[in-house]
Amino acid sequence: MLLIERLKGYQFSLEEIRALMEGDPTEERLGAAIAAKRAALALQMEAYQHTLQRMQQDIDIIERGIPI
């Protein structure tokens, strides 16, 4: 139960959790899945960071009275 909650906290979908829990999940399989999820989240964070930077640039431009 704790593992399922932890995986949900790591943004695993219920389908992903079900697939991981089928049979006897090995530490190797779990580790690989968590590492893959971490990499995907890191890419998502980079994309969000880029969007935030562009938004701030547009805010700065608008505040200076320059049309975007």
Image (spheres, rainbow, N blue to C red):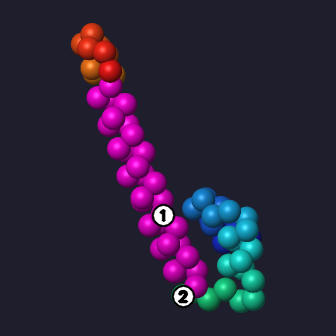
Give the vertical position of 8 relative to 53 (above or below): below
Horizontal side of 60 relative to 20 (left or right) equals left
Say whether residue 44 is magenta.
Answer: yes
Count of marks placed on residues? 2
Q: Compare residues 19 and 5 and report the one nearer the observer.
A: 19
Say whether residue 21 is magenta.
Answer: no
Give the vertical position of 9 relative to 15 (above or below): above
* Residue receiving disc 1: 40
Secondary structure at badge 2 equals helix
Q: Compare residues 39 and 51 and report the one nearer the observer.
A: 51
* Residue receiving disc 2: 28
Q: Where does residue 53 sit, x and y in percent of width and height?
A: 32, 37
Q: Quarter-wise, where is residue 5 in the image? A: bottom right
Main SS of the magenta segment? helix
For the residue marked with disc 1, what is the amino acid? Ala
Q: Where does residue 55 sit, x and y in percent of width and height?
A: 37, 31
Q: Residue at x 75, y 83 (%)?
A: 22
Q: Which residues are magenta?
A: 29-58
Q: Earlier in the sequence, mark 1 or mark 2?
A: 2
Q: Where does residue 30 sit, x and y in percent of width and height?
A: 58, 80
Q: Quadrant of the C terminus?
A: top left
Give the vertical position of 33 relative to 61 (above or below): below
For the residue marked with disc 2, what is the amino acid? Glu
